[in-house]
């Protein structure tokens, strides 16, 4: 049990101009290992019966959210879940980032506080409702006691309790009494029936929407503390490089530079502000010794080795029937290879972190997907006890996985800089440039998929063998529990659970450790497996003269597990006018995929003139179970498709001598406004438990577009990005 | 360090000790603490740093501060006044923002476009807005928001004329 919740620095205090602003005290409240257990917590002014909710005497309700808000809308969605069950008035509801504490750990990830794999809604939907129901029961008991009636005779609505005779007590008025009560046990709570929902299922605007259109300083990079200095690092070009020489004195003489220090990742220049730090860094003229850096491979060399590995089976992820036997004896066997390059996350807000040591510990401000590791790493690096490290999670200016790195690299580096310049007694803000970000490693794994299928006379597959080669982001991290029998679940997802009816199946994986360092990127390995499978199935359909939608339909039909997948396939095809004739040079392509429980199908429509590809329209039908915030879900689907199109058309980090060739948005382009297609989203109404939405529409876009290009031209592209194939987009 | 520069930002005069060559972006963010204008690339490639210089959208990350002296600078903090700018309202109506980081630049570019051209064609919107990157993929909603404001402006202009 850790007593870290006794001091919460509110976001408002940061906005007011620094850590030394207003401090909201939540006295006597202990967060615990058991996030789901309601705990008693009280002050006269506020009521926090549970780690997830705080109610104040003025009636304000704050949802305290463990997952990071990085644009996916989790603050608003979880606050909606809370507000609905609590019967709060929506206008009284706000959300704030939780501290780093086991109470906010993700049970799917062994309690790590990490925002990953679109799990925030599926994981916290129930626990948020339980927290709200407990708080509501305490408020009702307090009101009932005042009126001398039975709690069961009272009802709640719009932030107030009503007595049988119509008397009303607002939640705020009940806070002092309610905070003296013990929370009821979870078993005693009655959760609403979905028919009683009044907020869940309605489109609600983002709680922080106004801050985001008025330029409020809400991101990590906006943190500003008194006497703060800014650092930027001349980082090693490849892991294992050593400093040979640099011009320390020249950099120190640069205006505004206060210190130049060597740290494990490179040479840090600390200055009055970022521009001064950058000017100093440019004067370092560092020469690097690469002799101890090990193998410095090019992307081509990595790919050749991957191809060689794919010739033999890897660790087994799935096996049924006799795939090898069937492939050996079949008449018609098709073999294809699909390759995805390394890509960088490139969130619009460059990586940054601010660390400040105080007599009682240290404060860390950053946008992060991984608070539990940040805390551990800051503590270890600065030699303080973890319970004295306070993580202040800011809004994330995008992340897509990057701010959840397996070694908390930016926190570690910033703490190392601080430790090296302690004599300056200043908070340190560490800022990466865009070039640092694009060249900094931790890319989406390069992946090579070798697929083989035998096909019967009817054109349908009788055996299917899928060999994947991709480095694992999980091995050697706290997420190693996702690796079982040598198989990283995130590398084979979507492949090992192939939904298509094939009697003989093998899926295996090689996870070599050479090449660039890797990190999950939005939609993890499903981007690779979906591209490979949905391209290959499309090839098999055309090979046998089948319509690609009909072919998939037949392969999905007959298994009740596929009912929801079939439904999204039908809905997408219908909404996209699949089957309507198109003029020459235009084509439609389809892809269907289940992303960790969320089922989606996409149809892309393209026009190809010579080598010029124009994506006109992408239609997506999606079933993510119960929908909390419909417009938020639509926004995630639109954004996921655009994010995926950047990767499909342009995205590539190419290695040369072990380092990225690309450096900024000129050679690492993203999809721009004028190339954006019309996007139509069909949401499937559902009473199933909610599944994730932040990533679920990413995997389909690339195969749908490439299949459409084939339909338009007969040209089959089996490698991302499209521009590598000599096409323009 | 640096000579004092007299800057007019959002109608207010500031005297700031900034060296020649320091980009306006960093003068705004680090010296004047106006942190609504964002750093994204440092090379005028992403447009997150877009501000107005005498009403024209410019990339402040590559604009040396001395070139802003004697001119009027407008940033996201000065786009609305007590009330939001119509584009900010439209951004909320269409729920444009996701992570929100690029939206200062998007809004400043859109405002400059509509001030020059209250009734832009689709191609004119493309030309202005394609300079501003959004990694979250909010482009379709940005287009809808701009069109809704343009439509309102044209209706209002039509009402005035009649």
Image (cartoon, coloured by chain):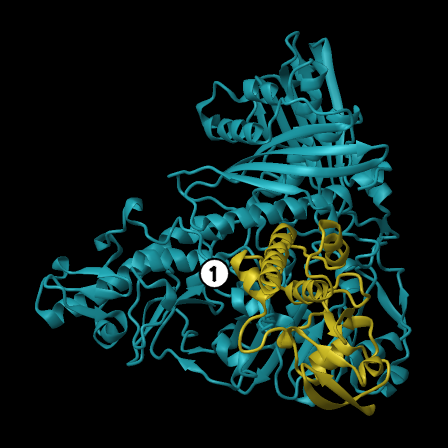
Chain colours: A cyan, B yellow
Quarter of the image with the C terminus of chain A is top right
Seen as rendered, the residue at the extreme left is A148
Above or below residue A326? Residue B111 is below
Q: Residue A640 in the image: x percent, y percent? A: 61, 47
- SS at mark 1? helix
Q: Residue at left 33%, top 78%?
A: A28
Which residue has dot 1 on it?
A: A75
Image quadrant where residue A492 sits: top right
Q: Is residue A140 left or right of residue A418?
A: left
The image quadrant of residue B96 is bottom right
On the image, the x and y values in percent for residue B103 come to 64, 63
| Residue A68 % position (x, y) | 53, 61
Residue at 67% across, 77% down: A429
Q: Chain of mark 1?
A: A
Q: Quadrant of the N terminus of chain A?
A: bottom left
Q: Residues within 10 Å of mark 1 (few under 14, many from 20)?
A: many
Q: Is residue A493 visible?
A: no
Q: Is residue A644 above or below residue B66?
A: above
Would residue A296 be seen by someone viewing this image from the given angle? Answer: yes
Instruction: Identify the residue at horizontal 86%, vertical 42% (top origin).
Output: A301
Give the quadrant of residue B3. Answer: bottom right
Q: Nearer the viewer, residue A476 or B1?
A: B1
């Amino acid at each position: 049990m850790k007593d870290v919740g006794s001091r919460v620095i509110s976001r408002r205090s940061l906005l007011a101009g620094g850590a030394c602003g207003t401090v909201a005290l939540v006295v006597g409240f202990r967060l615990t290992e058991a996030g789901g257990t309601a705990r008693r917590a009280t002050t006269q002014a506020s009521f926090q019966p549970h780690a997830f909710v705080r109610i104040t005497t003025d009636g304000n309700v704050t949802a305290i959210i463990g997952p990071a808000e990085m644009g996916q809308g989790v603050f608003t969605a979880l606050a909606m879940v809370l507000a609905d069950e609590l019967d709060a008035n929506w206008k009284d509801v706000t959300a704030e980032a939780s501290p780093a504490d086991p109470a906010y750990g993700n049970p799917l990830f062994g309690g790590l506080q990490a925002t990953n794999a679109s799990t925030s809604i599926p994981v916290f939907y129930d626990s948020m409702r339980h927290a709200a129901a407990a708080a509501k029961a305490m408020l009702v008991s307090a009101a009932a006691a005042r009126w001398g009636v039975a709690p069961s005779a009272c009802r709640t609505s719009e932030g107030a309790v009503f007595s049988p005779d119509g008397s009303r007590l607002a939640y705020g008025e009940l806070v002092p009494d309610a905070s003296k009560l013990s929370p009821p046990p979870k078993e005693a709570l009655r959760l609403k029936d979905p028919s009683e929902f009044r907020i869940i299922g309605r489109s609600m605007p983002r709680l922080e929407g106004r801050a985001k259109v008025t330029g409020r300083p809400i991101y990590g990079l906006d943190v500003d503390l008194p006497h703060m200095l800014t650092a930027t690092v001349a980082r090693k070009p490849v892991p294992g490089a050593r400093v040979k020489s640099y011009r320390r004195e020249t950099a120190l003489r640069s205006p505004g530079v206060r210190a130049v220090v060597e740290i494990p990742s490179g040479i840090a220049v600390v200055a009055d502000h970022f521009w001064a730090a950058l000017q100093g860094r440019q004067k370092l003229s560092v020469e690097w010794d690469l002799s101890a850096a090990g193998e410095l491979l090019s992307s081509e060399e990595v790919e050749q080795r991957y191809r060689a590995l794919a010739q033999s089976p890897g660790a087994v992820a799935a096996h049924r029937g006799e795939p090898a036997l069937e492939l050996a004896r079949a008449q018609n066997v098709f073999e294809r290879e699909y390759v995805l390059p390394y890509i960088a996350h490139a969130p619009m807000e460059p990586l940054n972190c601010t660390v400040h040591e105080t007599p009682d510990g240290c404060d860390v401000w950053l946008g992060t997907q991984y608070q539990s590791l940040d805390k551990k790493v800051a503590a270890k690096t600065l030699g303080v006890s973890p319970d004295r490290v306070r993580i202040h999670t800011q809004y994330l200016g995008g992340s897509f996985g990057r701010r959840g790195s397996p070694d908390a690299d930016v926190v570690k580096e910033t703490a190392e800089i601080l430790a090296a310049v302690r004599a300056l007694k200043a908070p340190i803000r560490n800022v990466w440039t865009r070039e640092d970000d694009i060249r900094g490693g931790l890319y989406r794994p390069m992946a090579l998929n070798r697929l083989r299928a035998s096909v019967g006379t009817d054109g349908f597959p009788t055996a299917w063998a899928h060999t994947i080669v991709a480095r694992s982001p999980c091995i050697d991290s706290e997420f190693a529990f996702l690796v079982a029998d040598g198989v990283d679940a995130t590398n084979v997802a979507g492949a090992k659970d192939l939904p298509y009816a094939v009697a003989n199946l093998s899926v295996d994986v090689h996870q070599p450790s050479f090449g660039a360092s890797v990190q999950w990127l939005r939609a993890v390995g499903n981007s690779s497996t979906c591209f490979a499978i949905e391209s290959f199935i499309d090839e098999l359909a055309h090979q046998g003269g089948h319509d690609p939608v009909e072919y998939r339909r037949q392969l999905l039909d007959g298994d009740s597990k596929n009912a929801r997948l079939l439904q999204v396939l039908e809905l997408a095809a219908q909404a996209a006018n699949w089957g309507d004739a198109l003029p020459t040079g235009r084509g439609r392509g389809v892809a269907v995929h289940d992303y960790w429980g969320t089922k989606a199908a996409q149809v892309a429509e393209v026009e190809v003139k010579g080598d010029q590809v124009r994506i006109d329209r992408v239609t997506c039908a999606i079933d993510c179970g119960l929908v909390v915030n419909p417009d938020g879900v639509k926004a995630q689907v639109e954004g996921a498709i655009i994010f995926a199109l950047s990767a499909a058309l342009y995205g590539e980090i190419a290695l040369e001598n072990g380092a990225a060739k690309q450096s900024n948005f000129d050679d690492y382009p993203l999809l721009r406004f004028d190339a954006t297609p019309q996007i139509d989203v069909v949401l499937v109404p559902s009473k199933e438990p909610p599944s994730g939405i932040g990533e679920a529409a990413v995997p389909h876009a690339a195969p749908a577009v490439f299949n459409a290009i084939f339909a338009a031209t007969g040209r089959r592209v089996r490698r991302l990005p499209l521009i590598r194939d000599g096409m323009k987009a | 360090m640096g000579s004092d520069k007299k800057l007019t930002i959002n109608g207010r005069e500031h005297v700031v000790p900034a060296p020649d060559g320091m980009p306006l972006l960093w003068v705004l963010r680090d010296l004047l603490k106006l942190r609504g204008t964002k750093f994204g690339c440092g090379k005028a490639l992403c447009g997150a740093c877009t501000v107005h210089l005498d009403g024209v959208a410019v990339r402040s990350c590559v604009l040396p501060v001395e070139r802003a002296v004697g001119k009027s600078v407008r940033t996201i903090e000065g786009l609305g006044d007590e009330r939001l700018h119509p584009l900010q309202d439209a951004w909320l109506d269409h729920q444009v923002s996701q992570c929100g980081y690029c939206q200062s630049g998007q809004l400043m570019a859109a405002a400059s476009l509509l001030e020059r051209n209250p009734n832009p064609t689709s191609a004119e919107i493309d030309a202005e807005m394609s300079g501003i990157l959004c990694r979250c993929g909010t482009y379709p909603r940005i287009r809808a928001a701009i069109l809704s404001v343009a439509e309102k402006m044209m209706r209002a202009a039509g009402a005035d004329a009649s």
